[in-house]
Image (cartoon, grey):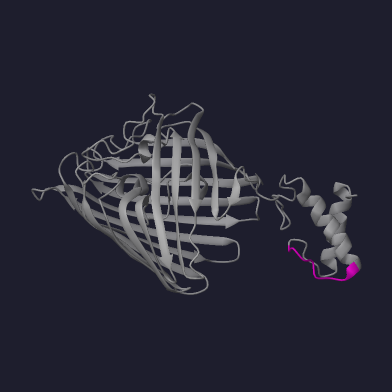
């Protein structure tokens, strides 16, 4: 029979005084204390409602899965719903209303090459206001580009690939997420509800082609492959190299360089046959057990078939994230984005975002934030609803299954 909430905290305190850390699966103290510690931890974690929000012993329970794993295959998804008070044309383009951003389903067989050759793959499907942004574009139909449902809603299949590997080498063939940058399309994998200008305007979301991954050691991963441009389907819309390298420089510092170069696709440059080079450099630094700093630099330089500039952008993104425990984390993001060709006028855009992540349960994530944007372009062109500067409040909730 479990103890009351007051008794639970007394038991935990007693165990910790005896040198027992109840946050660990095995307490590792004397038998008598083990019993009390087990009772205390079980009582705190049993509800999975994030008790102990501001202390080390926060418990979020075990994640629940709707489909689970079967014969190496797994399936799941999430539902992301949110509200933001102002539009910024970076996914969040429907202000002052509650909306469904992502209703996401996936099925996957991850490869395991520890015993030799293995084969797998993955398919993702999304419906919501983020759907039209993640469709495949191209000179043809783009294969899911017509799956709109009016009022900014629509469907997409952002991933559909097979993967094979042997030992330290693997290859994806099909339609898959990019390796460029730090922010991604999938909502649960981002700290913030809103997105950076750099991610939305200067980076690809997906590629179609083949990408090899080679991992010669735990500290080095090398990428290289051929793709049909940016955000395209299986149409012939581009010819580009996609590659990079990820290095664990120390136990606390990792560095990733990723690049794409070649012809990005006719659709990206409005029929211009946009071609050029871009890269992202991401440094991830653990300043302490709780504090994480991320620095990202993106450079994009492209021209059309006649040699005229299409886009010239330079972005610096910085993130500082403090994780209190499994239930709570605070974060800040500062972005400076210098652009030519993205908006009607040349100039800079800066943005500051402050927010937190709260997990009342392993399957639930709540992300409130406040964002300040300043448009320093020659005209009012960056898509801000309030003109050249605005303050936006946003909050979303993600339910995983």
Q: Is residue 29 magenta?
A: yes
Queried whether the magenta region covers residue 317, the answer comes back as no
Is 203 left or right of 371, judged from the image as shown? left
Q: Main secondary structure of the magenta part?
A: loop
Give the number of marks: 0
**Snapshot quadrant of residue 242:** bottom left
Residue lying furthest left: 306
The quadrant holding residue 166 is bottom left
**230 and 33: which one is in front?**
230
Residue that sits furthest to the top in the current view? 150
Nearest the eye: 195 or 77: 77
Tell me which residue sits at (35%, 44%) in the image: 200
Q: Nearer the viewer, residue 137 or 106?
A: 106
Q: Is residue 89 left or right of residue 326?
A: left
User: Residue 317, position in %: x, y?
Assistant: 40, 54
Q: Look at the image and tell me whether residue 84 can be seen.
A: no
75 to the left or right of 37: left
Residue drawn at point x = 82 percent, y = 65 percent: 16
For the question of whether residue 25 can be seen, the reply is yes
Q: Quadrant of the C terminus?
A: top right
Q: Position of residue 15 (x, y in %)?
A: 85, 64
Span of residues in magenta: 24-31
Instruction: Find residue 75 and report its horizontal and vertical position in percent.
Output: 54, 46
Whole-percent x, y for residue 34 in the image: 86, 65
Q: Residue at x 25, y 39 (%)?
A: 343
């Amino acid at each position: 029979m479990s103890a009351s909430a007051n008794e639970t905290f007394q038991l935990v305190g007693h165990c910790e005084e005896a040198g027992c850390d109840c946050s660990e699966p095995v307490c590792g103290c004397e038998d008598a204390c083990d019993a009390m510690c087990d009772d205390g931890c079980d009582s705190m974690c049993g509800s999975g409602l994030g008790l102990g929000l501001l202390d080390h012993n926060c418990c979020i329970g075990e994640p629940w899965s709707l489909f689970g794993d079967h014969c190496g295959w797994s399936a799941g998804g999430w539902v992301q719903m949110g509200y933001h008070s102002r539009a910024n044309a970076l996914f969040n383009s429907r202000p002052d209303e509650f909306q469904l951003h992502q209703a996401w389903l996936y099925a996957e067989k991850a490869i395991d090459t520890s015993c030799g050759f293995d084969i797998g793959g993955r398919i993702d499907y999304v419906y919501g206001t983020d759907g039209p942004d993640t469709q495949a574009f191209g000179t043809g139909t783009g294969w899911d580009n017509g799956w709109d449902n009016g009022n900014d809603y629509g469907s997409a299949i952002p991933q559909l690939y097979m993967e094979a590997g042997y030992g330290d080498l693997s290859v994806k063939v099909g339609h898959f997420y990019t390796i460029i940058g730090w922010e991604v399309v999938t909502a649960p994998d981002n700290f913030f509800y809103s997105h950076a200008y750099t991610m939305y305007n200067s980076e690809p979301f997906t590629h179609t082609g083949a990408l090899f991954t080679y991992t010669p050691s735990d500290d080095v991963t090398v990428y290289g492959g051929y793709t049909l441009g940016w955000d395209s389907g299986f149409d012939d819309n581009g010819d580009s190299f996609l590659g990079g390298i990820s290095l664990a420089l120390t136990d606390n510092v990792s560095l990733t360089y990723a690049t794409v170069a070649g012809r990005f696709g006719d659709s990206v440059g409005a029929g211009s046959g946009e071609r050029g080079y871009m890269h992202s450099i991401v440094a991830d630094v653990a300043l302490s057990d709780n504090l994480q700093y991320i620095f990202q630099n993106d450079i994009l330089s492209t021209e059309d078939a006649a040699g005229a500039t299409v886009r010239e952008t330079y972005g610096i993104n910085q993130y500082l994230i403090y994780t209190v425990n499994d239930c709570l984390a605070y974060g800040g993001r500062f972005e400076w984005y210098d652009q030519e060709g993205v908006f009607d006028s040349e100039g800079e855009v800066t943005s500051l975002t402050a927010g937190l992540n709260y997990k009342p349960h392993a399957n639930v994530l709540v992300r409130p934030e406040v964002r300040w944007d300043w448009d320093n372009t020659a005209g009012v062109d960056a898509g801000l609803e309030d003109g050249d500067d605005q303050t936006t409040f946003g909050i979303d909730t993600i339910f995983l299954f």
